[in-house]
Image (cartoon, rainbow, N blue to C red):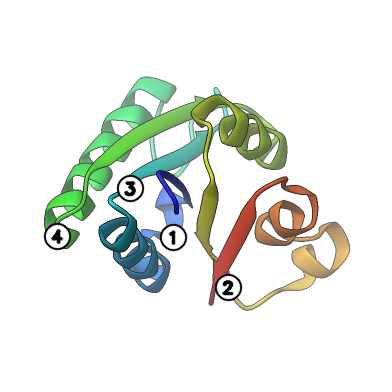
């Protein structure tokens, strides 16, 4: 049913991704699908990494650990972009993803004013989006 499952990750909040990754891994095993961990970073230094190359290395490591932990095939895709929503939209197309599984969190003021990344994908994506809180 699904072959390419995209899992957007925010490495600054990796501790909050456990449920979404577990759900994605279950779907991966049931469907013999590959999980594609997608992380978006700006070109400037962040709290996660000093530069895009360091971010990509951290994302690769994170994906490898999750793949081994859950026993599923994984790939990591680090994207340098200032607009997370646009970057995720582009990655859906680039990967040929047929499902997105992503974590959500309790909304704060920013999400009420600007909206959330999960909400954007759920509303605008041409494929199914499974948002896990």
Quarter occupied by residue 115: bottom right
Q: Which mark is residue 33?
A: 3
How far separated are the C-alphas under marks 4 and 1?
Answer: 18 Å
- Disc 2 crowd, CA 10 A, few/some/many (<14, 14-19, 20+): few
Determine whether the residue tagged by mark 4 lies in a helix, strand or loop: helix
- Image height of 79 relative to 104, above or below: above
Front position among marks 4 and 1: 4
Residue identifier under label 2: 105
Determine whether the residue tagged by mark 3 lies in a helix, strand or loop: loop
Q: Position of residue 47 (x, y in %)?
A: 44, 44
Q: Answer with mark 3 or mark 1, whichever residue precedes in sequence.
A: 1
Q: Position of residue 46 (x, y in %)?
A: 49, 38
Quarter occupied by residue 29: bottom left
Q: Answer with mark 2 or mark 1, whichever residue precedes in sequence.
A: 1
Q: Position of residue 22 (x, y in %)?
A: 32, 69
Front position among marks 2 and 4: 4
- Image height of 97 relative to 52, above or below: below
- Image height of 120 relative to 104, above or below: above
Residue identifier under label 4: 69
**Quick one: quadrant of the N terminus?**
bottom left
Determine whether the residue tagged by mark 1 lies in a helix, strand or loop: helix
């Amino acid at each position: 049913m699904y072959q390419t499952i995209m899992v957007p990750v925010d490495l600054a909040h990796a501790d909050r991704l456990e449920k979404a990754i577990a759900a994605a891994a279950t779907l991966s095993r049931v469907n013999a699908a590959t999980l594609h961990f997608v992380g978006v970073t700006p070109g400037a230094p962040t709290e996660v990494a000093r530069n895009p190359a360091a971010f990509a290395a951290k994302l690769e490591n994170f994906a490898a650990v999750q793949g081994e932990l859950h026993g599923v095939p994984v790939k990591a895709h680090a994207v340098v972009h200032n607009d997370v929503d646009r970057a995720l939209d582009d990655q859906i197309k680039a990967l040929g993803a047929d499902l997105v599984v992503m974590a959500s969190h309790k909304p704060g003021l920013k999400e009420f004013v600007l909206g959330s990344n999960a909400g954007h994908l759920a509303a605008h994506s041409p494929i199914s989006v499974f948002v896990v809180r």
